[in-house]
Amino acid sequence: MKIFVTGIGVVSAIGLNAGENLHSLQSGVTGISKSPVFNLMLGLLTPPVGLCLYITGRIADVSLEEVSKAAFPFLLVGIGVLILITVFPALTVWLPRAWLG
C-alpha cells in the first residue's frame, strides 16, 4: 500500500507544481501527467520494488527470476516509450486531439 500512496503523492505534487506553467506548454495537463505516471508504472516492473513482478510470480507460481526474464523485453520497450514521451510531449495528446477535435 505504501507504493500506491507514494505514486499518488508524486503525481499530485507534479500536477500542482506544473499548474502555473501549463499555458506555456503545448501538451497541457495530459502531457504533464503521463510522463510521471508512465515512469512510476515502469518502476512497478523492476526489482527491488517490482510489485507487479512479485504478484505475477505468485499467481503463476513461478520464481521472480523467471518473471523478470519474461518482463525484460517489455521493460525495454517501456523505457523507449518513456524517452519518446519525455522528449516529444506532444505525442501524448495527438490522438485525443485528433479524436475529440
Image (tube, helix red, strand yellow):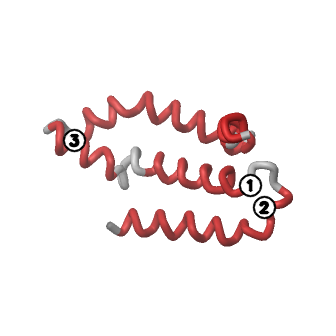
Q: Which residue is drawn at 39% across and 63% down?
A: 4
What is the spatial separation of the Cα atoms under label 1 and label 3, in whole angstroms?
38 Å
- Which of the two discs, 2 and 1, labels the residue nearer the N terminus? 2
- Judge left or right: residue 59 versus residue 7: left
Q: Residue 57's image quarter?
A: top left
| Disc marking residue 28 | 1
Q: Position of residue 75 (x, y in %)?
A: 46, 36
Q: Residue at x 49, y 53 (%)?
A: 40
What is the spatial separation of the Cα atoms under label 3 and label 2, in whole angstroms?
41 Å
Q: Position of residue 93 (x, y in %)?
A: 69, 42
Q: Is mark 1 on a helix, strand or loop?
A: helix
Quadrant (top left, top right, bottom left, bottom right) of the N terminus: bottom left
Callout 3 crowding tier (Cα within 10 Å): few <14, some 14–19, many ≥20: some
Q: How many marks?
A: 3
The answer to whether the residues at label 2 and label 1 have Cβ atoms under 8 Å apart is yes
- Identify the residue position indicated by label 2 in the image: 22
User: The disc labelled 1 sits on which kind of residue?
Assistant: Gly
Q: In this view, does 4 lie above or below 92?
A: below
Q: Which residue is drawn at 19% across and 38% down?
A: 63
User: The disc labelled 2 sits on which kind of residue?
Assistant: Leu
Q: Where is residue 12 in the image (x, y as percent from the top left)?
A: 57, 68
Q: Where is residue 97 in the image (x, y as percent from the top left)?
A: 72, 40
- Identify the residue position indicated by label 3 in the image: 57
Q: Residue at x 62, y 56 (%)?
A: 33
